[in-house]
Image: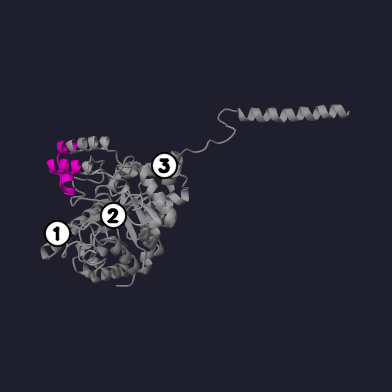
Amino acid sequence: MKMNGRRYGIAAALAVLLLAALWTLRPGLTPAEAEPTPEEIAARIHKSAIVIDTHVDIPSFFGSALYDPGLRNAYPVQVDLPRMREGGLDAAFFIVYVSQTERGAVGYAEAASEALAKFAAIRRMTDIQYKDEIGLALDAADVRRLHGEGKRIALIGIENGYSVAKEPALLDFYYDLGARYFGLVHNGHNDLSDSAQPQEKFADKPNEEGGEHDGLSELGRAMVARANDLGLMVDVSHASRAAALDAIAASRAPVIASHSSVHALRPHPRNMTDEEMLALKEKGGVIQIVAFDEYLHDVPEEKKAARRDLAVSLGLTSLDAFFSADAETKSKFVAGVAELDAKWPRATVATLADHIDYAVKLIGIDHVGIASDFQGGGGIEGWSHAGETANVTIELVRRGYDEEQIAKLWGGNQLRVMEAAEKARKAK
């Protein structure tokens, strides 16, 4: 009996193993679910996270037949609604940029006119042309609401405080038009701030070390205070190191660097030093690492000179000129740039991720974001237009960032700063 019982036990065990084996061989079933690929994880992230690009430039005729944001446009357009949908880009700060010119009544008037044209163009897109597809967000709650409705989201940032001249009341006016961050300066000192890339013809004093104001001017400090009062985020990209540190210290709300990269990896005046990034973190702010070739790696002077010469030879000496050029001229420029990129390759999404990695290790995942600077010189191999946005996410997944971390990088951190600026607002 003892032997028979043992045989019975062995037979039962074998039967269980056989049934298990047969179960795993049923059609459509596998012993274990396959690990999702980085592409699958990225697709999942883009369905749930709010993906925000904090810097997209536009020409003054944005919203016209020359640049219809509802259509898939040819180069030099890098951001339109079809590409935003294709790349999983939910939101973008469209930029009211004004060029730096001679300070004085004429220059101030021209800057204000240029700014108003861009405000009007953005509002035309969101309020008239494509109001069923994209909405204007005026606060973080609007961003979340519009995302929940399945719409693309437009936000507005100002680049170059030259557009406010010496009139703080203009800042109130621009806020009422929808501006939600205020970039103090661009290339060339202005009345508010020293620039990271000064141009002597746009400075009241020669650009000796120390700049014109040794950082922020008193008017600049007053503008930072007024921005805080309005609930308008202060942006220190393009500011000199002294001006950036001044603005961070002066602001009572967190500050952003809307499109900068890491100076330790690429020593460029436009990139932020460890000191600046640590100060930004201390104030609760965010640096948005930007996909701008020259800020991510060294670009030979020979290539830069050849690209400038190509643009000049084709009459493409401004952003508006690029957009209004005929198809043949654009084609020649694209072909010429492709030849230069073949000889001297552009930075890649991996290079961008290197800068993100460095910033995250230095100041933490809560203080880093991502920007393109599309249509203002941005664009790298793998992220050359909004339709390729998911490629950045895929690279971050491959590097071990989890879904929560990537959601912070792509927009969560920016929304936190936006909410903090809103809380700092004082009644007018």
Find disc 2 in the rendering and name its residue. 270
Q: Does residue 118 appear in this view?
A: yes
> From the viewer's perspective, is 10 left or right of 21?
right
**Sequence-earlier tag: 1 or 3:** 1
> What mark, if any, has residue 394 been given in the picture?
3
Q: Is residue 116 above or below residue 326?
A: below
Please, what is the three-letter code of the amino acid marked with disc 1?
Answer: Lys
310 or 112, nearer to the observer: 310
Screen quadrant of the N terminus: top right
The Cα atoms of the two marked residues, 3 and 2, are separated by: 27 Å
**Residue at screen point 27% across, 60% down:** 240
The Cα atoms of the two marked residues, 1 and 2, are separated by: 19 Å
As for residue 314 lying within the magenta part, the answer is yes
Find disc 1 in the rendering and name its residue. 201
The Cα atoms of the two marked residues, 1 and 3, are separated by: 44 Å
As for residue 218 lying within the magenta part, the answer is no
144 or 386, nearer to the observer: 386
Q: Is residue 169 above or below residue 291?
A: below
